[in-house]
Structures are given as structure tokens and as C-alpha cells.
Amino acid sequence: MKALRNAEAFEALRQGRIWKLLASDLSPLVLAMLQSLLAEEDKVLPSSVLVERLTRDIDALRGQGHVLP
């Protein structure tokens, strides 16, 4: 019954936002931006700095031809 329990847990995850993000065509870009922003030395950022850095990264990715909403 462990497999059934695991299958049910994965099905619940599949309905969530995180799974949908990972299944998205944009997930590599989103994960790359989040990793670059949150894996640096600054573990806590003011929202204004976070938005500024995200905007910079999005503009750079768009400049390389990536289509981002």
C-alpha cells in the first residue's frame, strides 16, 4: 500500500501551483531567475530591490529572444 499512498501524494502535488510551474514551458527561466536572486548572499531583500533585479533579469532574457509575459 506504500505505492498507493505515494501515488495519492503525488496526485495531490500535481494539482498544486508548484507542479504547474514545473510543468510550464517557462519553468527553466523562472527557476533560473529565482535561483540567481535567492541563492546569492542576500537572503532577505526589500521588495523594491527584488522587483528591480527581476525586471533586469527579465529584460536581459527578453533581449536574448525569450518570450516572457
Image (cartoon, grey):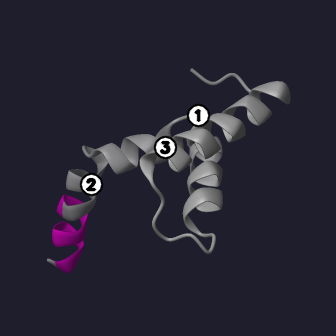
Q: Secondary structure at mark 1?
A: loop
Using a 10 Å C-alpha cutoff, classify the residue at mark 2 as few (fewer than 14 neighbours), some (14 to 19) or many (20 or more): few
In the image, 6 versus 38, the foreground residue is 38
Boundaries of the magenta span: 2-8
- Please determine whether, in this image, residue 67 is positioned above or below residue 41: above
Q: Secondary structure at mark 2?
A: helix
**Residue at image point 54% right, 63% down:** 38
Identified by mark 1, the residue type is Asp
The mark nearer the N terminus, 1 or 3, is: 1
**Residue position for label 1:** 25
**Residue at image point 19% right, 79% down:** 2
Q: Is residue 4 magenta?
A: yes
Left or right? Give the position of 28 relative to 3: right
Q: Position of residue 22 (x, y in %)?
A: 48, 47
Q: Position of residue 45 (x, y in %)?
A: 48, 59
Q: Position of residue 42 (x, y in %)?
A: 56, 70
- Please determine whether, in this image, residue 33 is positioned above or below residue 69: below
**Residue position for label 3:** 48
**Residue position for label 2:** 13
- Most extreme residue toward the right is 64
Left or right? Give the position of 43 relative to 35: left
Q: Position of residue 17 (x, y in %)?
A: 31, 44
The mark nearer the N terminus, 1 or 2, is: 2
Query: How far apart in space, not on screen, are marks 1 and 2 (Cα)?
Result: 18 Å
- Foreground mark, 1 or 3? 3
In the image, 19 versus 53, the foreground residue is 53
Q: Secondary structure at mark 3?
A: helix
Query: How far apart in space, not on screen, are marks 3 and 2 (Cα)?
Result: 31 Å
The answer to whether the residue labelled 1 contacts the one labelled 3, judged by CB atoms less than 8 Å apart, is no
Identified by mark 2, the residue type is Leu
User: In the drawing, what numbered circle is on residue 12?
Assistant: none
